[in-house]
Amino acid sequence: MSPSPDPAARHQEGARHLDPARVLDVDPLLEDPKTRIVVCCGAGGVGKTTTAAALGLRAAERGRKVVVLTIDPARRLAQSMGIDSLDNTPRRVKGVDDSAGGELHAMMLDMKRTFDEIVEVHADPDRAAAILGNPFYQSLSAGFAGTQEYMAMEKLGQLRARDDWDLIVVDTPPSRSALDFLDAPKRLGSFLDGKLIRVLLAPAKVGGRAGMKFLNVGMSMMTGVLGKVLGGQFLKDVQTFVAAMDSMFGGFRTRADATYKLLQAPGTAFLVVAVPERDALREAAYFVERLAAEDMPLAGLVLNRVHGSGAERLSAERALAAAENLEDSRIVDQDDGKAGVRNSPDTQGSSDSLEPTAHPSSESAPENPGTPESADPVDERSVDRLTAGLLRLHAERMHLLAREQRTRDRFTARHPEVAVTEVAALPGDVHDLAGLRDIGARLATRRPELPEPGA
């Protein structure tokens, strides 16, 4: 009868695995016709684009008509889907299994083009031309802080209003902070409602001689200072832009509020994407708390690039000890070290047994040089060194697994209500539909990537 395992070891081994009750089941989410929007969010560099594309492909091959909206300027989504380029117009992806009746479309947000479209739709032709040609507008639409995130929400609102797709999967911008996506509309609203904008709008709102008098008396000092700081021509461009955009400012805020409510509505699901690293999971925790505070529906956490091992039972300590034994020929790989060899029955009564065995002379060498007796000690030492190196690599992998597990455990302890699904760290980048399909299958597998104890 085998001895019962140590309780501490049992606890440590079991801690490597997620509670099955908290494992995220992706397929019911994607297949539910009530799910209309899935937002993949998280810090930059955690795999949001690949996750969004894989979810979109899996949903399409399970019968949904899907559009994936990416905001990734690296264009990896286009490459992985076999499309030469993506732009502001959804393009159908070829090579998708449509036997279930689904379709997959993809597009990449063109921030400036989206801003231009808003102006063209909501301003008369003359005013639109004046805005589009304004130098300050061109700078604002191309790179003002928060514009990308705001335009992503604008485009999401446009896609949902068209009602051409069963499911919209959004890959949020690669911001340093995951919260930028939710904060952008409020930041842009604060800019439009800011004191500088109100000051620049004041002359136009007062109008006539009173307006001119106000401008000459009340604004002269202000514009003089701003002109010195910003440059006279720049300030004039800003004033012209603000005057032309005045009638549209309310529309920006209204649409931002509408999209915000859309994100809170039933049918929207947020997936927070992270990797098992401290900073990424801390960012994920902040986002989870923010979603709860804003009453936005969180489906769960996608934990990317999780490392595993097929030799989990061999601990780092045992691997390092074995490597040291192999690297030091004076140490015998036994529990009692050299003492065990001295006390071995095979060595009793022989004072020469611990001495190294001399190589047989050429006269006594066996006829067949390929037999084990003729093995070259140099080759044996090379094998030992190689084995020791592999054992040390295994020890490093086990230390990495333990570190990832501790990081994940801290997150789950803080947010036990959040369901989690894991995706293994892959040896290379995903660059085609087959790779995306594999990622989708991993996302939907209701088990952790690490092997179960005893497997």
Image: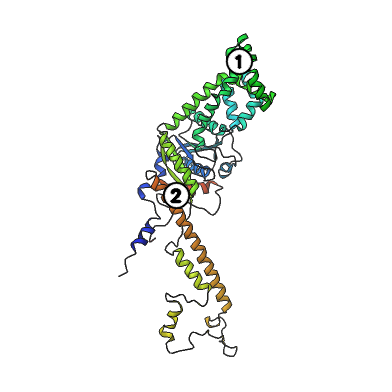
Residue 14 to residue 129: above or below: below
Dot label at residue 422:
2
Asked where in the image residue 144 lies, by quadrant, the reply is top right
Q: Which residue in the protein does label 1 denote?
A: 203
Element type where label 1 sits in the image: helix
In 3D space, how far apart are the residues under numbered discs 2 and 1 (Cα atoms)? 58 Å
Picture coordinates of residue 119, whole percent (x, y): 58, 23
Task: Check contact, mark 2 vs mark 1: CB within 8 A.
Answer: no
Instruction: Name the residue at 46% across, 63% down.
Output: 316
Spot occupied by residue 350 in the image (x, y as percentages of width and height): 45, 89
Q: Residues within 10 Å of mark 2 (few under 14, many from 20)?
A: many
Residue type (three-letter) at the residue carrying disc 2 = Glu
Q: Is residue 18 visible?
A: yes
Describe the colour scheme in one phrase.
rainbow
Q: In this view, does 210 lie above or below 301?
A: above
Amino acid marked by disc 1? Pro
